[in-house]
Amino acid sequence: MDRFSFLGLPLLLSGMLMAAPAAPARFKTVIFGHHSDSLASFETFARKAKQSGATHVVITAEDLPWAMWQMDTPGDPYPAWAVSNVGLLKVSIPDALQPYLPKDYSDTVLGILKQRCEVLRKLGLKAAFTTFEPQILPERVYEAHPLWRGPQVDHPLRSRVPRFAPSIDNPEVLALYRESMKKLLTLCPEIEILSLHTNDSGSGMSWSNGLYQGPNGNSLFRGRKMYERYREFFGALQDGAKDARPGPLEIDAEWVREASPDLVASKLAGGMAVANIEGPNATVYKAVVGFLLDYFYPFYPAQGLPLAVRYLEELEAASKSKAPRLFYLIGDRQESDLYLEIYDAFQKNPTHDDLSRMQLLRAIAAKRVGEAGASGLVDAWMALNRVQRDADILNFGGTLLYIGSVHQRLLTRPFVPFPDELTDDETSYYRKYQFQARTEERARDLGDIQGTRQYQGLGGAAVSGMLLKRMRADLTRVREDLEQIGASTAAQKAPMELFDKRVQVLEILLQNGQNALDYQYLLDFMKGGRLLRPIEFQEHLTDITEWREIKNIARSEMDNSIVLANLIESTRDILIDTTRTSAEENIRVLGPDLAAQLRRKVKIMVKHWEDYERLFDPEKEVPKKAAK
């Protein structure tokens, strides 16, 4: 009997011993979302979503052209958090802002949105629009219109120049938003739901406690109540919708971090919400299953690793919600069909405990890999669920993989004992893509993550290390499961090999994070020549534990880099997220020449290999090229 064969046996008994599970909540509105890389893929997903009962589909899933023109100040990385966000004013540009914002960007994005809404119109579906608001505008706007300047919204540790959102206290700014919404909904009348994030990623509400810089904004309006701001801002957006077409526009604001969101909500009308609290009766606005932003995918930049257990657990929680709206957001770009299967199966047979969840997942697994491999696939899904939970523990403004391996280019930068001696040529391919707004010394520190050092020190390294080790152990179990499934039937050999490659990529990313933290810890320990000592014969050097350990970490990093490069080059299937062209590479996405960058990293590390002896041997001569 295999590990989960018992799941099919107790169905009759469980039905006798427990009350039948309640039917899923009947939401009046069901919004599906998924990343689309073409209009054809958008339409394919929309058709499937409709079959599953969706009433709306998200048309802004971080899959539209990025506004790289917002990276307007060399050396300031902060707008990298905003470029992917479809801001209303920068996409649907009011007349007064036309001189300051690029029309070609607006035309391109609006063209895609219009096509997507035409697809939804044909299918009898409506649209949901996600954005970050009020979003930063170029400084030239405020030079021309000083009283439009609202709160400073940049993160003080992650920016080098101040960034300001417009003041929605100013009636003229509200008029801009009304005009923007009118233009957008005239073109895309299917949009009925607007979900916005605020007080983050280049956006913010004036005088909000949730702002990174603390409450600030146009001093002329300091005394206003926060509920007045939200109510009038939402009202202006809804007025713009009414100007464009008949019908509703529901609006909710997330990430507000207001002190009393229930008080704010109590002053709002129905169809308006903050912090998931809808006015005027402070009721729950929506239930959410999943996510759309890469920020929330716990394995990013790895791709195609399913979160089956998590989605089923969240569906179960959502079914108990009293919210009238359900958002079912599929952030895994490679496995949308699996999540649709889970959703459909849950609607027919809702789960209510661990046993029923495993039974539902095993039934889906059997359809995918056959009865012989079903239990192994469920076991793999469970192990990945444990990995994602541990990844979330290491999430401080983003997972270690996302804001470390990618944003700090831990994955592609060389690990060397004297990083300040690297030449411009040796740093040119990665330094410009580091999210670092502080000093060059911090930029060279492998443990400095966007200006903070949450993983550093003995305690930070130890806790992170234990979690990363546990995560890799679970991935070993996943790979064992996949090997057994692939061996059970010839039809599963190729898909399981691809799945295994994707797991290997995640293993390497986790090892990269571990190596970076351990390597920097040892460098910090050795700072100031702490371990320099006379070296008279071989044993004086080879008995230094730290000397062996830091070189072993470096070798691990070099070997893993080559393995990852080989994996990437072994298939055309997507294993890790990269941009399509080198010109598109940016702080938040690795470049398409990733394999070449990894090999370059190793070459640089080998070039500096002899430098390790200088950490301990005071007589080891500093190379002339490195001498200060």
Image (cartoon, rainbow, N blue to C red):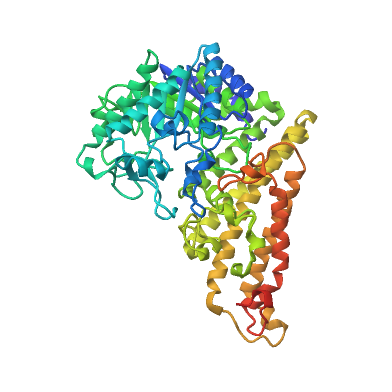
Q: Residue furthest right?
A: 490
Residue drawn 64% across the image and 41% down it: 579
Q: Classify residue 570 by image quadrant.
A: top right
Q: From the viewer's side, name the closer residue of 257 and 240.
A: 240
Q: Quadrant of the C terminus?
A: bottom right
Q: In the image, what residue occupies the spot 37% across and 20% down?
A: 241
Q: Residue at x 39, y 32 (%)?
A: 96
Residue 531: x %, y % from top left = 58, 79
In this picture, residue 169 sits left or right of residue 340: left
Task: For the N terminus, give its image quadrant.
Answer: top right
Between residues 106 and 344, which one lies in front from this camera angle?
106
Q: Is residue 94 left or right of residue 332?
A: left
Q: Taking 495 as reference, is 554 above or below it?
A: below
Residue 55 vs 218, above or below: the answer is: above
Residue 352 shows in the view = no
Q: Is residue 320 left or right of residue 579?
A: left
The residue depicted at 40 percent of the width and 27 percent of the height is: 180
